[in-house]
Amino acid sequence: MAQLFTPAATTLFRVMIVLTGLGVVAAGAAAYVWARSGSTWNVGKPASQPVPFRHDLHSGSLGIDCRYCHPTVERAADAGMPSAQTCMSCHSQVWIGASVLEPIRSSFLLGQPIEWTSVHRLPDYAYFNHAVHVTKGVACETCHGRVDQMPKTVKTQTMSMGWCLDCHRDPTPHLRPREAVFSMGYEPHGKDLPDDVRVFYQEASRRLVSCSTCHR
Ligand code: HEC
Ligand code: HEC
Ligand code: HEC
Ligand code: HEC
Ligand code: HEC
């Protein structure tokens, strides 16, 4: 039978099939990289809040302890959010008439919670617990960054599964002494960890990366 296409045309056709295939793979890879990159996890993006609360002023300049406003962080899954009453312990005396504090005053008078917008929110199928981390020496700063310098609260880490697992494979370089978990600007010295802690995590890391630890 006579050839339908010249050899050159056949080669061109083959090349085009391969390139199309590669293009599909590359587009898929690009979409994946984009979907897992920082910007799509809202890293660095502030949320709009009912009151322009500032950590840099309250935690940084005034030095108020994190637990004053996030009272359950050492003993429960949730850190806890401040009630209007917590704010009014000071703001019934300072900045009394300020209009920015109006939502605080009205929720105080009506006894209603303030609706803060979440900055960090995992999907429901992922389980997280503050107490476990904080009591084992994982600091606020390690997961939330320099909150004490933030005029607006933002995420500094993706909070993706890959991020959780990076630490769970070997938490030791990130651990601090218990008394330093609320400190900011501290250099974790994982190197000085006692040997029994190191041995513990060689064993524990298998449990820490198993699916049912976070998907239960
Ligand atoms: C321990 C006392 C204290 C507590 C508790 C407190 N504040 Fe303040 N806050 C202050 C002081 C003092 C200032 C004024 C600082 C200044 O004028 O430099 C201030 C200022 C402010 C301002 C104005 C900031 C600005 O300069 O733009 C806002 C808004 C505010 N606080 C919101 C809150 C909210 C919301 C809460 C509760 C979650 C709260 N504060 C809890 C002491 C407190
Ligand atoms: C005076 C009260 C107060 C103190 C002290 C305080 N916070 Fe907060 N924090 C708030 C309020 C109000 C919000 C909600 C508004 C916002 O996101 O800025 C908040 C939000 C947060 C969030 C984001 C929560 C979310 O929705 O995902 C983190 C993380 C956080 N605080 C960490 C800290 C850390 C770490 C410290 C100690 C260094 C601290 N806070 C001290 C009042 C406080
Ligand atoms: C191992 C990482 C990690 C550490 C350490 C950590 N957090 Fe969080 N934090 C998270 C994650 C993840 C969320 C989102 C939780 C969710 O949606 O279930 C969160 C949410 C929050 C929230 C939002 C509301 C809530 O009740 O959970 C606050 C406030 C907060 N963290 C404060 C703190 C403070 C204060 C510390 C230090 C004492 C701290 N966190 C330590 C990872 C961490
Ligand atoms: C910087 C290190 C670090 C990061 C980041 C981190 N963890 Fe952990 N996680 C730990 C350590 C340390 C423990 C305590 C393990 C122990 O001593 O049993 C732990 C324990 C846990 C436990 C309890 C495990 C058990 O069986 O008792 C859960 C659940 C958990 N982490 C979920 C998460 C999730 C979800 C994320 C991400 C959103 C996360 N962790 C991010 C270090 C980390
Ligand atoms: C240390 C905690 C942790 C462990 C262990 C873990 N995951 Fe996750 N996983 C998360 C968190 C947090 C999310 C939500 C954030 C995200 O999508 O990355 C998630 C999301 C997922 C998703 C949805 C991903 C997407 O792109 O929407 C799947 C599927 C999943 N996990 C499967 C698994 C499987 C299978 C394992 C065991 C091999 C596992 N996970 C172990 C924390 C964990």
Image (spheres, rainbow, N blue to C red):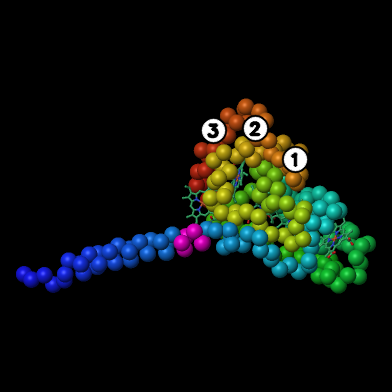
- The crowding category of the residue bearing disc 3, from other C-alpha atoms within 10 Å (few below 14, some 14 to 19, many at least 20), is few
x%, y% of residue 38?
Answer: 58, 58
Q: Which residue is mark 1?
A: 180
- Within 8 Å of ligand 4, the CB of disc 3? no
N-terminal label among 3 and 1: 1
Measure the alpha-carbon separation of dots 3 and 1.
25 Å
User: Which amino acid type corresponds to the residue marked 2 in the rendered image?
Assistant: Lys
- The answer to which of 68 and 46 lies nearer the viewer is 46
Total of numbered circles in the picture? 3
Q: Which residues are magenta?
A: 30-35
Residue denoted by label 3 = 203
Above or below 70: residue 91: below
Q: Residues within 10 Å of mark 2 (few under 14, many from 20)?
A: few
Tell me if residue 85 can be seen: no
Q: What is the quadrant of residue 92 in the picture? A: bottom right
Based on the displayed image, in which of its 4 quarters is residue 15 positioned? bottom left
Q: Position of residue 201 (x, y in %)?
A: 58, 34
| Residue 53 within the magenta-colored segment of the rendering | no
Q: Residue furthest top?
A: 195
Q: Nearer the viewer, mark 1 or mark 2?
A: 2
The quadrant of the picture occupied by the N terminus is bottom left
